[in-house]
Amino acid sequence: MPKRIIAIASGGGHWQQLMLMRPAFSHHDVHYLTTLPGLPDEFGISAFSIIPDCNRNSKLKVLRATAALAKHVWRLRPHIVISTGALPGVIALVMGRLAGARTIWVDSVANAEEMSLSGKLARRHAHLWLTQWEDVAEATGAEFAGRIL
Amino acid sequence: MIFVTVGTQLPFPRLLSAMNDHATGLDEPVVAQTCSDDGKWPALECHGLLQPDAFARCFSQARVVIAHAGIGSVLSARRWNKPLVLMPRRHDLGEHRNDHQLATARRLEGSPGIHIAWEASDLFALLKRDDLVGAMEVIDPQREALLARLRDFIDD
């Protein structure tokens, strides 16, 4: 039976990496979340919502993004939440896990020498915590399973 | 047309100023996503942030793309088979919060269709070449391995 999945990434490289991971979950019922209007259309995606972007420098924006993400998680009741970053993805993992989802963090392939700040935050909230680089796995205890680049 | 992009997060005046200086001597237009509205680059056709459809249009119509060493730029170049020149942002110049773009550039150096401009002078030398080939999607066992791991976890 297909699972309900939330796949979330901020605009830019995070999103493009998520797009390349689609073959891993496209046979399920996937709802995409991203921060940049127009991006899902560019990749032929129809099941999506746009969420407000946020970063750690603005508490207000974090609150706003959290409220939006709580709403989507409540509505979609996902079995799985997967994110490639950045901060909105971490918040989605937190919310998803609270709602009973299994959660996946794939740290961006941009972080070849150190786990991203968002990735470090995601550690406690991800059932599957992946880095795309062997050295980072070694240094952090994250799992390395391959890379998208 | 040459397309320059510095991503959507941070300005990158070192790259844009270098391209601005260089653009006056070129007989082709240079379009840039500048990520700031300063407009200090009169020789470039500047856009602060392009909408995704306009970004796709610029990228796909360019002869060559010049970019910061962001993953979005790399994956776009492979998607549209464009020759790509990356200039990594440097932490010591205040261009990013750490040196991860230097690491990305080191790891991508030698990948087909991807060239690294460590300095502005490398940039100009690369732009003079007429034999640049496009970047391509790579069939990489590392990618298959990652997808298999994700599929296993999700389907479990």
Image: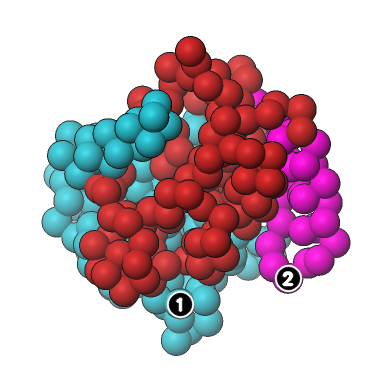
Chain colours: A red, B cyan
In the picture, the disc for residue B66 is none
- Provide the residue span drawn in magenta: A48-73
| Rendering coords of residue A125 (x, y %) | 57, 55
Q: Nearer the viewer, residue A82 or B4?
A: A82
The alpha-carbon separation of the residues under discs 2 and 1 comes to 17 Å
| Rendering coords of residue A111 (x, y %) | 38, 64
Residue underneath mark 2: A57
Q: Residue at x 73, y 70 (%)?
A: A57
Q: Do discs 2 and 1 share a chain?
A: no
Which residue occupies the extreme bottom position in the image? B92
Which chain hosts label 2? Answer: A
| Left or right position of B145 against A117 | left
Q: Residues within 10 Å of mark 2 (few under 14, many from 20)?
A: few
Q: Quadrant of residue B103?
A: bottom left
Q: Residue at x 68, y 46 (%)?
A: A98
Secondary structure at badge 1 equals loop
